[in-house]
Image (tube, helix red, strand yellow):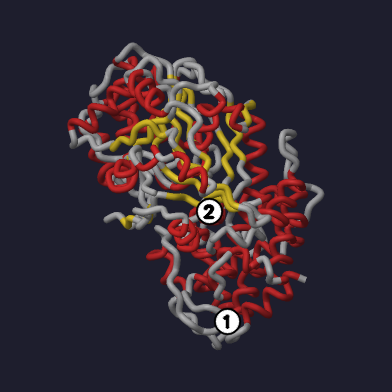
Amino acid sequence: MILNEEGLKNTAEWESKGYDLPHYDRRAMVEETRKHPTWVHLGAGNLFRAFQANAAQKLLNKGVSKTGVIVAEGFDYEIAEKQYRPHDNYSILVTLKSDGSIEKTVIGSIAESCVMDSENPAEWGRMKEIFAAPSLQMVSFTITEKGYSLVNGKGEVMPAVENDFKMGPAKPQSYIGKVTALLYDRYQAGSLPIAMVSMDNCSHNGEKLLTAVKAYVEKWTEAGLVDNGFKDYIETSGKVSFPWTMIDKITPRPDKSVEEMLRKDGLEGLDPVVTSRNTYVAPFVNSEETEYLVVEDVFPNGRPHLEDAGIMFTDRETVNKVERMKVCTCLNPLHTAMAVLGCLLGYTKISDEMKDADIVGLIKGIGYQEGLPVVTNPGILDPKKFIDTVIDVRLVNPFMPDTPQRIATDTSQKLSIRYGETVKAYLASDKLNIKDLKRIPFVYAAWIRYLMGVNDNGEAFELSPDPLIPSLKPYVEGFKLGTVPSQEELKQTLLPLLKNKQIFNVDLEEAGLSDEVLQYFAEMLKGTGAIRSTLHKVAE
């Protein structure tokens, strides 16, 4: 069994092994999509293959769509070149359910894989052609929150961005520079309408995308590198919209145990590819069954009928409420706490952490006790039921090979939203007392303890990737396990960090939480086992 057009001709063999195959004429779909593209997705990673590509397949299977999705990779070209194309853009989705059952789906909805390389005339020319197509309705994104940033960790404009600001849309090098240049092609093709839909897991994602695009438009307009009308085109929602969305689906790195299961089925060519940019991709993705995507319904050129694939469409206010519910209270804060504590306590699977009464007590306290009081019910999803599903179905799923190490990636970029908004809500409330927050200050302290790269047994471990690690490490270099500095010494060293609003969203000293954070941190320095004993007290 080989995952490509030829290998899938033997449908009986695939179906006998339990694979759900595409229920449509794929060749006709590919041809129609190439001629009349309706949906382009930027970001060819695992989430796209598990969620958006599967949603497109559901529409094709139901016969409500004739076109699939075109995926384009603008950062790590090798994903398309070494993984998508050798498999004729097919992928396998392995859905791991909490009851132990497994669904295996061959995803054929990806009609074409493109590379956003402005130095490659053929690849870039195809991207320009797609963006100039009148049929194109939406461009969706999963490029991670970092993808929308034009500055580095120090707040300096990145060289590629600076270069694109000066040189204009001809041969952009930065990601959003490429996106903006392609939008300029669409503008030049007749100011054609389009929806630019960020589906990244970050707050106000549509606004982040718009802000990043406008930065290029303004620089290019000021320098006379684009027509003056381009600015009006981008800023007119009836022409170009930037809907807000909330997405939620756990899609960890392709797991070895899943790979072995597929090999037993007789599937060949499963070796993963590790690109030169250190991206790990395989011909399959493994994912949980639970998924949510809530989208602001602003599509000036129409849109695919994604409601038929379970995607919810609503207004911006509701999207914002759902996003705040999930990111600030009901999932992401719990995930981050588990990531930090999991690394410190030596766990390598999230589901194993859910057997730890102290960790479960901690996340229940963060969600139900400290978070829920400040959540606004969005109406289309119930906050308490959402947390119930997270704790009782999703995190406990032993078949989901998700790791605290993966989730701990970029924690410095996440604390601001995942806890800072709750802290601000307590400060603004006349009914809630900031001093009632115990678990959130503990997580802050645990994160600082995590930065030391030494676990609760006194053993060194590797920190997960984070752009601020080089600037954060100096804060903890002077601390040693078994030596507890005075409160004054701790303040002198760590207060500048605790006052950093970029990281915490608030000045923790002004908020009245810095002393509590320092106290927890000091307790966790006492020696081996100190993290566990401190956690146990907080979790009770």
Specify whether 85 is left or right of 521.
Answer: left
Residue 355 in the image: x percent, y percent? 68, 69
Residue at the image position 47 percent from the left and 41 percent from the top: 12
CA gap, disc 2 and disc 1: 24 Å
Q: At label 1, which amino acid type do we have? A: Leu
Q: Depth check: 263 or 395 in front?
A: 263
Q: Which mark is residue 359?
A: none
Residue 50 against residue 420 in the figure, above or below: above
Neighbor class of circle 1 (other Cα within 10 Å; few <14, some 14-19, many 20+) is many
Q: Which mark is residue 525?
A: 1
Residue 282 in the image: x percent, y percent? 39, 52
Q: At label 2, which amino acid type do we have? A: Lys
Residue at the image position 48 percent from the left and 75 percent from the top: 452
Is residue 483 something that shows in the picture? yes
Quadrant in which residue 315 is drawn? top right
Specify whether 157 is left or right of 336.
Answer: left
Looking at the image, tell me whether mark 2 or mark 1 is earlier in sequence order.
Answer: 2
Q: Nearer the viewer, mark 2 or mark 1?
A: 2
Residue 106 in the image: x percent, y percent? 47, 41
Residue 456 in the image: x percent, y percent? 57, 80
Label 1 sits on a secondary structure element that is loop
